[in-house]
Image (cartoon, rainbow, N blue to C red):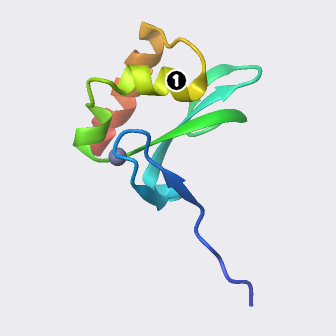
Amino acid sequence: MIQKTPVMRKCISCRTTFDRNNLLKITNDHKLGIMLNQGMGRSAYICKSKKCYTDSKLQKKLQKALKRTLNHDFFDIFEREIANYK
Ligand SMILES: [Zn+2]
């Protein structure tokens, strides 16, 4: 029997560790740029608590974690995504 160990990742806002499946993943994909919940490359994770995804410093934290500038296009997509969690 194969034991499935959950992959744990840390929320960049509250710094709490969660099962990766319960986190929103933002990836700086090598080819495609910033992607949500997909892509390969440097990633940052945010938990699905309102306190975190509405964090006023989230943009700065994300940019630091992903080492790139995030534009309004990304936050449009991001806001559409988090609208599903309410
Ligand atoms: Zn969090």
Nearer to us in this view, 16 or 20? 16
Extreme residue toward the bottom, this view: 1
x and y percentages locating residue 9 in the rendered image? 53, 53
x and y percentages locating residue 22 in the rendered image? 44, 56
Image quadrant holding the N terminus, namely bottom right
The quadrant holding residue 78 is: top left
Nearer to us in this view, 79 or 49? 49
Q: Which residue is mark 1?
A: 64
Residue at 52% over, 23% down: 64
Label 1's element?
A: helix
Residue at 58% over, 68% down: 6
x and y percentages locating residue 15 in the rendered image? 40, 48
Nearer to us in this view, 74 or 55? 55
Left or right of 61 in this view: 57: left
Q: Is residue 55 visible?
A: yes
x and y percentages locating residue 86 in the rendered image? 22, 43
